[in-house]
Image (cartoon, helix red, strand yellow):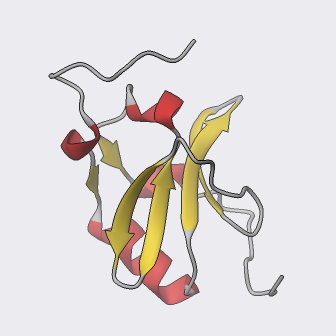
Amino acid sequence: MYSEPTEKNTPYDITVSEEVRRYILDKGHDFRVCTSCGGPILLSTLVKPAKPTDIEIYIGKYILYISIYQARFISCVSKDMIPQFTDYSYTA
């Protein structure tokens, strides 16, 4: 169940690693950190669209959306969240 972030864990406490920043800029579109059975995962918004409750972090001209549910538990978006099997070279 959703609850407001506490002072200790606000959306502004989330950092994005340089590898993830480069990945987003190289792919050239928006991404979203959402929930999977294996934990937080970084997916293209072509695969998993953003929700109105998501937190937005701007990476160049692109947006990294973070699920409000994940935002309470993560402090850094790291390359471990990038699925190794995904190719986003197609367009919607």
Does residue 88 appear in this view? Answer: yes
Q: How many marks?
A: 0
Q: As rendered, which of 13 and 80 lies closer to the eye?
A: 13
Q: As rendered, which of 92 and 75 lies closer to the eye?
A: 92
Q: Residue at x 43, y 15 (%)?
A: 3
Does residue 23 appear in this view? Answer: no
Query: Which image quadrant is residue 10 in?
Result: top left
Left or right relative to 16: residue 78: right
Q: Residue furthest front?
A: 52
Which part of the image, by quadrant, shows the N terminus?
top right
Q: As rendered, which of 4 and 82 lies closer to the eye?
A: 4
**How far across and how far down the image is residue 17, in percent?**
29, 61
Q: Residue at x 21, y 45 (%)?
A: 12
Left or right relative to 36: residue 63: left
Q: Residue at x 74, y 63 (%)?
A: 85
Would you place residue 49 above or below residue 40 in this image?
below
Q: Residue at x 28, y 70 (%)?
A: 18
Query: Which image quadrant is residue 89 in?
Result: bottom right
**How far across and how far down the image is residue 72, in percent?**
38, 26
**How far across and how far down the image is residue 63, in percent?**
45, 69
Would you place residue 22 above or below residue 42 in this image?
below
Left or right relative to 63: residue 36: right
**How far across and how far down the image is residue 22, in percent?**
38, 79
Left or right relative to 5: residue 68: right
Q: Residue furthest top?
A: 1
Which part of the image, by quadrant, shows the C terminus?
bottom right
